[in-house]
């Protein structure tokens, strides 16, 4: 099933200009990427949140480039419509420009992503400039930066308006095609969104961003962990999966499965 032409950097800009909201989410595997794409999602981020929601780690810091390329390749193979963005993991871009370019290039070359995302504002604008300078589209990410969890002293809402606005303007000037605003009060996100010509994609950043992103496992209710205030659960898949698996166990133990219907 196809739900329209491929979403590109250009179409995302046009959506901002027309005031059409961009709906984005994360995915890490083939079945969910396909479901999201067929449902009509505009952008799929293969987030380093894979470390927490799929690998069960406490934070995203341990995720490797090879793991990100692996998951991004699987997602890109499933998707026909959405724009696929590969998330650059911790220390894959901060150490040197050559290493950052080589790693960003792997997402496009080896995994089929159309863009990369990296965390940071003014401090990483020279890296964004180098990537966009060789034709790699970059989505920036400012505000609450999960890769800086230890420096922030936890996952905290960021409220320094002057710094956030300066970061947003710097990443736009460096050539980012979009910017994720994470954990930012709604009023500040609204001002940033108005000040930029590139689309802002919010997560815990209020309703006035040009688009929204959520972690797939959060919005589908697949997690056992704490659900942050900014998450809305649109399904309860964990409960449904538990019910289904318990029913299977019961029927196996009672000799009800397989019945003649499921036997040769
Ligand atoms: O890794 C991720 O999933 C993210 C989004 C939450 C923006 O960075």
Image (cartoon, helix red, strand yellow):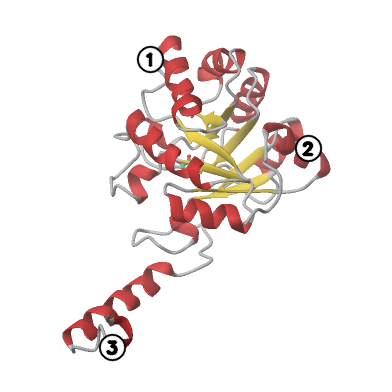
Q: Pick the quarter of the image with the N terminus.
A: bottom right
Label 3 sits on residue: 260
Q: Could you tell me how far apart the alpha carbons at marks 3 and 1 are, in whole angstroms?
A: 61 Å
Q: Quadrant of residue 121?
A: top right
Q: Could you tell me how far apart the alpha carbons at marks 2 and 3 are, in whole angstroms?
A: 56 Å
Place of residue 204 in the rendered image (x, y in percent of width and height, measured from the top left): 55, 48
The mark nearer the N terminus, 2 or 3, is 2
SS label for mark 1: loop
Q: Quadrant of residue 103?
A: top left
Location of residue 214 with respect to 110 vertically, above or below: below
- Residue shown at 60% from the left, 45% from the top: 80
Image disc number at residue 95 = 1
Place of residue 239 in the rendered image (x, y in percent of width and height, measured from the top left): 38, 73
Which is nearer the eye, 196 or 8? 8
Which is nearer the eye, 4 or 157? 4
Would you say the residues marked 2 and 1 are in contact, meaning their CB atoms lie under 8 Å apart?
A: no
């Amino acid at each position: 099933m196809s739900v329209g032409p491929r979403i590109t950097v250009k179409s995302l800009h046009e959506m901002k200009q027309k005031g059409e909201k961009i709906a984005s989410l994360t995915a890490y595997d083939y079945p969910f990427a396909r479901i999201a794409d067929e449902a009509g999602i505009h952008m799929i981020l293969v987030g380093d949140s894979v470390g927490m929601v799929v690998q069960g780690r406490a934070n995203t810091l341990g995720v490797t480039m090879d793991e990100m390329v692996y998951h991004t390749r699987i997602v890109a193979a499933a998707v026909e419509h959405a724009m696929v963005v590969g998330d650059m993991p911790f220390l894959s871009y901060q150490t040197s420009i050559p290493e950052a370019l080589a790693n960003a290039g792997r997402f496009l070359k080896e995994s089929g992503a159309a863009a990369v995302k990296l965390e940071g504002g003014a401090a990483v604008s020279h890296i964004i400039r180098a990537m966009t300078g060789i034709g790699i589209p970059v989505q920036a990410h400012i505000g609450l930066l999960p890769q800086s969890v230890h420096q922030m002293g936890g996952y905290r809402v960021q409220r320094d308006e002057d710094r956030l606005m300066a970061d947003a303007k710097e990443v736009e000037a460096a050539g980012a095609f979009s910017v994720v605003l994470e954990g930012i009060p709604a009023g500040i996100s609204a001002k940033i969104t108005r000040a930029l010509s590139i689309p802002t994609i919010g997560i815990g950043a209020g309703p006035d961003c040009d688009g929204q992103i959520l972690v797939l496992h959060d919005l589908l209710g697949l997690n056992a962990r704490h659900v942050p205030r900014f998450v809305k659960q649109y399904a309860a898949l964990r409960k449904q999966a538990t019910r289904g698996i318990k029913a299977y166990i019961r029927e196996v133990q009672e000799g009800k499965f397989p019945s003649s219907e499921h036997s040769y």
